[in-house]
Amino acid sequence: MAIDIKGVLSPLSAIGTLFEHPKTLTYPQAKKDIPVGYRGFHINNLETCIGCASCEEICMNEAIDMIHPDIEYNPKNTSGCVPRIDYGRCCWCSLCTDVCPPSSLKLDNICTHAECDPDNFLYMPKNIKNIGEDVS
Amino acid sequence: MKNNLENTIKIFHGPQHPGITGNMSVELDLLGETIKRAQTHVGYLHRGFEKLIERRTVVQAFTIVCRICVPEPDPNEENFARAVENLTGLEISEKAKYIRTMVLEMQRLATMFLWMGGQAGSIGLGLIPQWSVCDRDYMLDRFEELTGGRVYHMYAFPGGVRRDLPEGFLERLSDLLDYYEKRIIVYNNTFFDNVIFRKRAIGVGVVNRDDVLKNAYVGQTMRGCGIKKDVRKDMPYLMYDKLDFDIPIQQDGDVYARAIVRRDEMLQSIRILRQIIKQMPKEGEILQKIPKHRKFKLPSDDTYVQTESARGAMSYYMAGDGSEKIRRMQVRGPSLVHAYTLLEKLLVNTELADVAMTMNSLGICPPEIER
Amino acid sequence: MESGFYGSSLDDSLKCKFEESGLENTHKIMEKAVNWFRSRSIFVVAYGTGCGAIEMPPTFTSRYDAERMGVIGVATPRQADLIILSGYLAYKTLRRVIRTYEQMQRPRYIMTLGSCPINGGMYWDSYNTIKKLDDYIPVDVAVTGCMPRPEAVIDGFVLLQKRIKNGEKAGWEKYDENFEFYKDNQKRVLGGHIDPSYETDWYNLKSGGKA
Amino acid sequence: MDLASKLERLSLELVQKQDYLYKVTVNLERLESLLLSFLNEFGYITLDSINCRDDLEDGFFTITYCLQTKKRDHIVMVQTKIQRENASLPTMHTIWPQAEIMEREMHEMFGVDFPGHPTLIDFALEYWDNMPPLRRDFDTLEYVNSMNPFRKQRGDALDAKEEMKKKREAKKAAKLKAEKEAQTKAALEAQNNPSDEVKDEE
Amino acid sequence: MIFQIILLIMLAYVVGFIYFGLYRNITARIQSRYGPSVYQSFYDSIKLFSKKNTVNFGWMFYLGPVIMATGAILTLVLIPIFSDSDFLRSVTSQGNLFVLLYLMVLGPLGNALAVGTGGNPFGVMGVVRGLTRLIGLELPFYIAVVGLIIAANSSDIVHIIDLQKTTGLNIINHPLLFIGAMISMVGFFGESPFDIPGAPQEVYSGPRTEFSGKFLALLMSQGSLFAFAKLVLIVDLFLGGADSLEMLILKTFAIFVTIIFIGVVYGRYKVEQAVDFLMKLPTLIAVLGLARVVWFG
């Protein structure tokens, strides 16, 4: 009866991890830095959005609707509409931001959204000039 | 023949089962614990990708292809991009080629870590998945920086890649590789050398060497049988002909041999990545300027491209029809043949306890079987 | 469906008993305590119905470690409180999901990951996937993202725990109340074949063909 | 290449598509014998995949068999065309076992029949009673709309083109209106103060 | 007396659950994460008691957990907890090792009875695996116990404890017997490499597949009671018992941690591999120990 001594003993080295610090991110308390450039939720600078609907056109998920905004927007907006994104459709491919002519539509690095009612996933992009500024 | 199945009980291994790789099921006829017949069922993940791609333009279809195989999206993107480039005759710059090669190898490492978790979990070694999935996460962090996506990168665009390297990225990647080299020694001690894994895996799920070439088994299944073939060497694409690496092989063709091949491939991936970090050109065009706002017109022609994914050769057939849309794209992943022709054969006369292990070692990925 | 003996604490009969003896407050406190314990211990059966299955391992292993919040994976639906449907559902999967869900014991909850179960997601024009999951089974928490990061999944757990703690009306109660509605929808989309079929005689097919 | 001359003897042309990719086109009658000679004579022992393409406009399916040698250093595509109506192909599962599953899939997705194939039953779909879904005349969006309702909250979406037009027209109208108003104003002013003008003239 | 028994059960319940919580925490730390709260098992068990059961497999199915709990409680009551005090002495003196060894098998039999009526193929498969494994587990453990009985010339546990005070601890006197008993104890605790009955990758939760709600809670409670009983048994037999609560907890915890460490780092044997292993190595060690006892005293 041959005994694989190495095979029996070497796994025991794993017990040493008991005295190491855990690698866990305690998420709701400690948040990980999500790098700039992460494809998170949408932001739209209404001061520069021209309402051209390029984003609506390129989106193959038909996730983007053009609607009239409640707040003040760019007076040069050609259609008077700004995009609203259905997060029951979006796949965060960022094609809409790639084709945006004035680069007003961007992706922020905020990316968590949980909701009890599945009807509440129509997302109005936050009106922020640049990523990082005034995320409130 | 029918007598074999008398007195058997029929159980379903899946689709909701901790021991199955993804959402598929294997119908097993058991006599005691011994399997007398196995039958694969797929379709739980069928989305009709090939239909969806026909409805979309090239640019729109680009975002959908990476979903074809969930654990490793990048070979899909690479295949798609290369097929479009072949059809339209686009040439990409050297830097873009290097970046794509780097992404593919990073993805290979990440997938291998996930596989290691699955393989160890299938023999009840709950420690290794906890470690290796965490280690994979560090690679996903690098992906997050580079591509902006954690799992689905949507990075290798036809004509190049979508973004340039962030500042200091290569140094951070190099640090991660140092860490991985240390970790692989730890995994070697705790998992590959583990007496239980050796006892369970050696001599189980032996693939017949004569079948391998004819039945189009690929990847580690093939290399575990001692056949030294790899798409990266035989039909080099991107920068693989300028990089120095070996193809690890094992002779036994069992689960353990495939595990060792995978471990050695991880080391080779690290070696390739180190070379890429050294050779990465500073300057270069990231994405080809494509006239008319990234609109591709595919000629009415067809092509067939192959990429070595972490589980074997993955091929795309693509045909255009002179318009912006793709006439037909067919995916032939490594799992299709493995999950049907091979798995059904391998499981007969093994035991219920071996099912999860065998399945994991074949690298079966259900979303890619049925698309 | 429920027999007296195997029935439970904190159901209506118990409530009546408490009320008869004038102990409504005790019952309320008990219920609150039980809700707290329920929120602290959630047994999860993770059904990898779609792409989201790839973010389940990081959530439950050492990087994000959902277990520290009392969210613990179990193997069988019988023991589970929460089923995670991670991604789009093909019709074939929906049959299994309904079956799995109905095997779970009350109180039971459903959490969906990704945008696909909400409104079709990127497979909105696919002929084989479900577009609005909450028509067929009641969804308690939906997490959007493609795929949702483990952080988002944990946010979903936190939201669910808050709901359970507050004793809000959960999906399983809706399912029991509107059983006909859900069954009608299921029948409409699954064409009456709600149970999975495992009837093909593979072996005879094969040997008959090859002989 | 050696294969090219061999194929020339069979009066078939080998086309090089990419560095590692070659293509042979053959008609359906000769397909089976050609595949057999690829396997037995030319050494192409691996069947990598069978692809099917629906050329709806021309009324046929294009079938591609991808073959590889033992060395696996190049791929040969053997291509043939079959009629779309009552499509039927010889089955290859006796030669290559993996063809069984590929043909089963093709049967389900395109409705191609394989006489002699033992397991032509469901592959991925369950209780499917419509047209084979990958045929191009199957409209998946129409099927989806008949089966699954989408959410109704998005009813307030506007057509941006229409809005643009509307806004442009509104702008134009506003401009016109302004012009008109200016004109009428001027006219009114002119009417109201004819005396002034007269005076001015004077 | 009744009061003492109730006190003992409560003690075992609390200690068992906290041990289970610690088990989760230590495992989690080795897996480099934090793990759940130490009291998580309490939460689980209270939550499970508050669940509604809608499945009905008949009375036999629900008697299974009850039989198992009975086995666990009886085992617990018959083991002397403290060596020097009079606590529960009159009950423990009624039993001896043979009764205990019988009672330890009662649980799995009750389980088999219940799962058989449940009719779930995975449950039945798990039970068959469990019973097969039991054959292998019992052999080295019984041999070790027989060795101790011969050495002490008595099957009374109290006597064995008392004897260790004069002759020294059995772990030092009879190390081979201890190793044999410990290896099978790893299996009795359902730890890797002998955790085949409930292997989730193969048979879901094995025997527990159909149990839910209150009955699962009962199973968990009896599991922790029984775990405590087994730990105390090992401490009594090999570590000379304990004369105070602190000593008891210290000694049982040492044994427990050893078992956890073995369970964490190894994978899972297949059932016949497990029996094969248990029949060979631990049995051989135990037999050598027995021979040493018989020939050299």
Image (spheres, coloured by chain):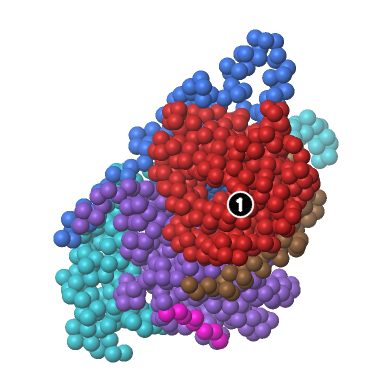
User: Could you tell me residue C139's position as x and y percent?
Assistant: 56, 36
Residue range in magenta is B244-251
The quadrant of the image that shows the C terminus of chain E is bottom right
Colour chosen for chain C? blue
Front-most of residues B300 and B304: B304
Q: Which chain is cyan?
A: D
Mark 1 Cα within 10 Å, few/some/many (few <14, many 20+)? few
Left or right of E231 in this view: A31: right
The residue under label 1 is which amino acid type?
Answer: Asn
Residue drawn at 69 percent across, 62 percent down: E172
The residue under label 1 is E153
Q: Which chain is brown?
A: A
Q: Is residue B294 visible?
A: no
Left or right of E138 in this view: D13: left
Colour chosen for chain E? red
Residue drawn at 39 percent across, 58 percent down: B351
Q: For the residue labelled by badge 1, is the local secondary structure a helix, a strand or a loop?
A: loop
